[in-house]
């Protein structure tokens, strides 16, 4: 059972913001236990730090829709069960914590809000970065990551991103007409953006340029959708594998290299690659 534990106030771009945090006492306990292990990490690169943090989540159960709680949007902190996106977000939030030598739960909550929401501010359900391509663009604007897909000879494609708007019944919060109308506006703005994707048949040729800790987003041919899954690149025996929250059960590392893993995924068209930098000016 989740419970709301606090309101907090902090400054973003000179403005005071307030967010409601929803979690359990067990999540708070897990946070401090995980923090103790993460504080011991002494990696030379941001990518290696991200991988080391990601490995602390190995065997954490996969759980769908952990953010769809209650009747209004709150900042959900759940370290007991993760989907692919919340896994990436939590690892990044701990990465910021480690980089900035922070040690309080409130800092972690601030980091998570910065990463999860458009321009770093929770302002209702539509402010969540639901589409992962927008998640990448928005977090790049915050200085947290850098989309390197085009540097890997990714191909530009034009594709309408409107899956939420055309599948309203799949999203409980879209029962609210205001939420739905705002999502339609967001999708209209996304339609103006092009996507750079590294095609599946070209990934192996670019493996040497993908680094440990790079965020890998799986592009799809499904109508109206940009990405179906995400995780982190991790090199195993010289090949790039995927460290991810797998729907098959838990956070794990793929047994086969990423190239071979993708061939088994229906509708996969390739990947988008973003490199964590963790240089956010929004975080003290």
Image (cartoon, rainbow, N blue to C red):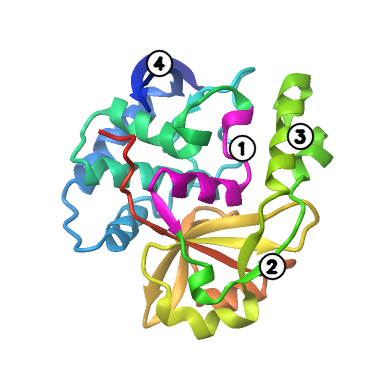
Name the residue rendered at 39%, 55% in the picture.
58
Q: The residue tagged with tag 4: helix, strand or loop?
A: strand
Residue sitting at x 58%, y 30% = 127
Quarter holding residue 199: bottom right
Compared to residue 127, the image places residue 18 above or below, namely: above
Marks 3 and 1, Cα distance to the nearest angstrom?
21 Å
Q: Is residue 255 visible?
A: no
Does residue 102 appear left or right of residue 188 in this picture?
A: left
Q: Which residue is mark 4?
A: 5
How packed is label 3: few (under 14 Cα within 10 Å), some, or many (20 or more)? Answer: some
Q: Earlier in the sequence, mark 1 or mark 4?
A: 4
> Is 101 positioned to the left or the right of 143 in the image?
left
Label 3 secondary element: helix
Circle number at residue 184:
3
Residue at 57% in and 33% down: 128
Q: How many residues crowd mark 2 within 10 Å: few (<14), some (14–19), many (20+)?
A: some
Q: Where does the magenta region start and end? A: 126-146
Where in the figure is residue 71, as x and y percent of width and height? 64, 17
Question: SS at mark 1?
Answer: loop
Q: Which residue is mark 2?
A: 268
Residue 194 picture quarter: bottom right
């Amino acid at each position: 059972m989740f419970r709301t534990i606090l309101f907090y106030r902090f400054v973003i771009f000179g403005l005071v913001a307030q967010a409601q945090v929803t979690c359990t006492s067990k999540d708070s306990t897990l946070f401090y236990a995980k923090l103790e292990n993460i504080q011991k990490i002494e990696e030379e690169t941001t990518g290696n730090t991200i991988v080391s943090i990601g490995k602390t989540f190995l065997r954490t159960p996969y759980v769908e829709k952990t953010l769809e709680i209650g009747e209004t949007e709150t900042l959900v902190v759940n370290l007991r069960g993760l989907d692919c996106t919340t896994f990436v977000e939590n690892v990044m939030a701990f990465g910021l914590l480690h980089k900035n030598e922070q040690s309080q739960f409130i800092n972690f909550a601030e980091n998570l809000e910065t990463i999860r929401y458009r321009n770093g501010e929770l302002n209702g359900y539509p402010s969540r970065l639901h589409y992962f391509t927008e998640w990448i663009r928005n977090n790049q604007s915050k200085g947290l990551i850098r989309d390197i897909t085009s540097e890997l000879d990714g191909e530009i494609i034009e594709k309408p991103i409107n899956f939420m708007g055309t599948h309203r019944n799949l999203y409980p919060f879209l029962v609210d007409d205001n939420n739905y109308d705002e999502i339609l506006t967001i999708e209209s703005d996304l339609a103006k953006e092009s996507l750079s994707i590294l095609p599946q048949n070209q990934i192996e040729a670019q493996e040497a340029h993908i680094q440990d800790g790079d965020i890998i987003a799986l592009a799809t041919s499904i109508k109206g959708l940009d990405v179906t899954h995400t995780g982190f690149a991790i090199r195993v025996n010289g090949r790039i594998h995927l460290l991810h929250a797998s729907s098959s059960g838990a956070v794990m590392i793929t047994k086969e290299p990423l190239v071979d893993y993708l061939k088994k995924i229906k509708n996969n068209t390739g990947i988008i690659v973003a490199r964590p930098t963790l240089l956010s000016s929004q975080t003290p």
